Amino acid sequence: MLQPILPLILFAFVATATPGIATTLSTASGARFGFRRSVPLLVGSATGLATVTGAAGAGLAGLLLAMPSLQVAMKIIGSLYLVWLAIKIGRAGPPNLDVAMARPNSFLGGAGIQWMNPKGWAMGLGAAASFAALADGPGQLALLLGSTFGLAAAISLSAWCAAGMVLARLLKTEWQWRALNIVLALVLAASIIPMWQPH
């Protein structure tokens, strides 16, 4: 029963575990706020990817990719949001010294990252095309892709969040925290570049 969908599971785990926007935010959130307070971000991001890949399986990604103006608008909004987040992370100090970053990212913030990322839609479309034979129709494919990618993202992002918590235990001084925040902010800002590259 599991064997036919094993390639899809592997694809989903590789796609969600490789460094990118969501993994960087999960690491930063784990380092600053710990696991429990990062749960809304993690669940939101996993849910966002599940809905994107599910919608791709149902056929919406084809429509999205056929409308260049909508793609450009998504890229602009997504890029501005990520630059704002990168600045927020980069300016933050240690958790106990900074009030401006007193709250972790929300469920909607996590989901929005996925909804505004054209790469996520392209990945969902690629998965829909590659694994369409596993389902009897668009509805079943949407359910299969959404649940597989959502679960894979939840596991992968939790691992990145835990890695952030480990980093937080190693950081003892204010300058170490500032250095980590700047590195994470730069990685997050750099993750915008692939969004603008042609597929």
Image: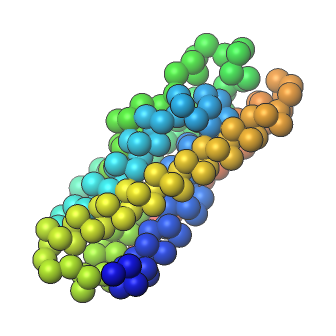
Query: Could you say where residue 25 lies in the image, as x and y percent from the top left?
Result: 56, 43
Quarter placement of the N terminus: bottom left
Relative to 85, does residue 79 appear above or below in the rendering? Answer: below
Query: Could you say where residue 15 lies in the image, as x and y percent from the top left?
Result: 49, 67
Relative to 192, does residue 161 appear above or below in the rendering? Answer: above
Q: Is residue 195 at least partly visible in the picture?
A: no
Q: Residue at x 45, y 60 (%)?
A: 152
Quarter placement of the C terminus: bottom left
Relative to 133, does residue 155 appear above or below in the rendering? Answer: above
Left or right for 179, reference 46: right
- The image quarter containing residue 119 is bottom left
* Front-lying residue, 25 or 168: 168
Left or right for 117, reference 82: left
Relative to 157, does residue 14 appear above or below in the rendering? Answer: below
* Front-lying residue, 33 or 195: 33
Q: Residue at x 76, y 30 (%)?
A: 178
